[in-house]
Amino acid sequence: MTNTEWNASNFDQAEKHKVMANEKGNCCNSLRNTKKFTPAPPPMPHSAATGCPCECMAPNNSAPTWRSTNVSSTTKDMWERLFDQGYNADVCINTDNGGVVYAHSTILAMASPVLRGMLKQANRHRRWRTISILGVPHDAVRVFIRFLYSSSYEKEEMDEMVLQLMVLSHAYMVPHLKRECEQKLELDLLNIDNVVDVFQLALLCDAPRLSLICHRKMLKNFKAVSESEGWKAMKHSHPALEKEILESVIDEENSKKDRMRKIKERRIYMQLYEAMEALVHICRDGCRTIGPHDKDFKSNQPCKYEACKGLELLVRHFAGCKLRVPGGCVHCKRMWQLLELHSRLCADPDYCRVPLCRNFKQRISRQSKKDEIRWKILVEKILRTRGIGIASCFRLQ
């Protein structure tokens, strides 16, 4: 029997008792209302089994108060002995395969509003009341009932039966055990082989954080997940859910491509801005072996502009090339474009020492509307990419 099969049978049994428990179970309603993914998983509450003050104890007709869960091992051992020995037990819980678990009605009623409703409807023979918890293994029911006594569990039992315990904690409204199961799955037990089953269970048990983590894991490792047995079973049992996940995979791939495209564009805009800075530096201050005629150069002097060396070679080629016309040499064409881009960025063309800056400024008014818009968009993107670090010699026209 698969996880999803025994989930459904157990949910049907507990559903009718939840209706009766709604009026007295308002403190747990928020755990059942959320039906959609949260945009980002919130931090997990502290574990009830680790001694952190996170249990909400609310007496009748009073505001909730926070009580510490620091319980000594002696006290826990006493509660576990009470469960194991069944001293003065008055409830008989029938489980699968003829199993029986004995418990105390007062403890069950205080720990779970659903069990409280079941006990009110249970048939009574002398001092015994009989209820049934079916659809999960007998050992899982025993571990679940023992947790209601001592709020503790054995690590090996949790590792083996965490899915069953999560179903029981949701169906019988035991939120602190449900949090324990979610945390155990998130931190230790979630893997490629079971992520599909856990994802479906998280949707059934209204665990938005866990479902979101499973969803992200499936998208990140989709190839391996799609070859697992859980995925093959989901294709037959829940084809609509499979379709939604596939659509999410496509959306994720498109988003990833869009992010890579924007990163590449940003890199190009940054390189163009750095080239503009290097061009002003060469024409105004000079660098190593090239610059204004009234400057002294040292070939071994350091330069803080990374684009300076490549731009220096391009300027030298531009100065000596015989095809220095638009549409001619590809290197010269690139230099023409850099000069025009500089003129679009330059804040003071009358005193600018970059060649042809003023000429390009005067030519702007004679350009077509299409070219004007194209250059304007490019300048805006370059300045927006650079942000607050724009040099004083540049401005948005």
Image (cartoon, grey):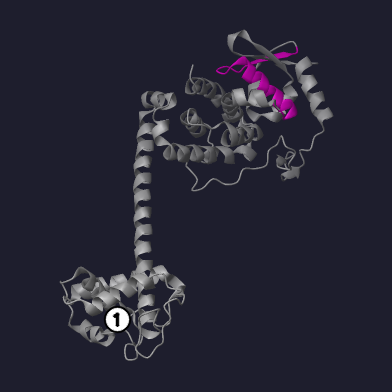
Measured as percent of width and height from the top left, residue 253 is found at 35, 45
Measured as percent of width and height from the top left, residue 202 is found at 51, 33
Considering the image in quadrants, where does the C terminus appear? bottom left
Q: Nearer the viewer, residue 71 or 333?
A: 333
Q: Which residue is mark 1?
A: 343
In terms of image quadrants, where is residue 130? top right
- Give amino acid for label 1: Ser
Q: Nearer the viewer, residue 254 or 319?
A: 319
Would residue 65 appear left or right of 244 to someone viewing this image?
right
Part of the protein shown in magenta? 127-152
Q: Is residue 307 above or below residue 34?
A: below
Would residue 159 be seen by someone viewing this image from the given angle? yes
Residue with the most extreme front position: 299
Badge 1, how many Cα within 10 Å: few under 14, some, many 20+?
A: many
At horizontal 38% and vertical 76% (from top left) the residue drawn is: 278
In terms of image quadrants, where is residue 190? top right
Q: Nearer the viewer, residue 306 or 340?
A: 306
Q: Is residue 376 above or below residue 18?
A: below
At horizontal 34% and vertical 82% (from top left) the residue drawn is: 346
Q: Is residue 51 above or below residue 306?
A: above
Would residue 394 be seen by someone viewing this image from the given angle? no
In terms of image quadrants, where is residue 72? top right
Measured as percent of width and height from the top left, residue 122 is found at 65, 17
Q: Is residue 375 above or below residue 363?
A: above
Residue with the most extreme top position: 98
At horizontal 30% and vertical 79% (from top left) the residue drawn is: 344
Q: Nearer the viewer, residue 93 or 242?
A: 242
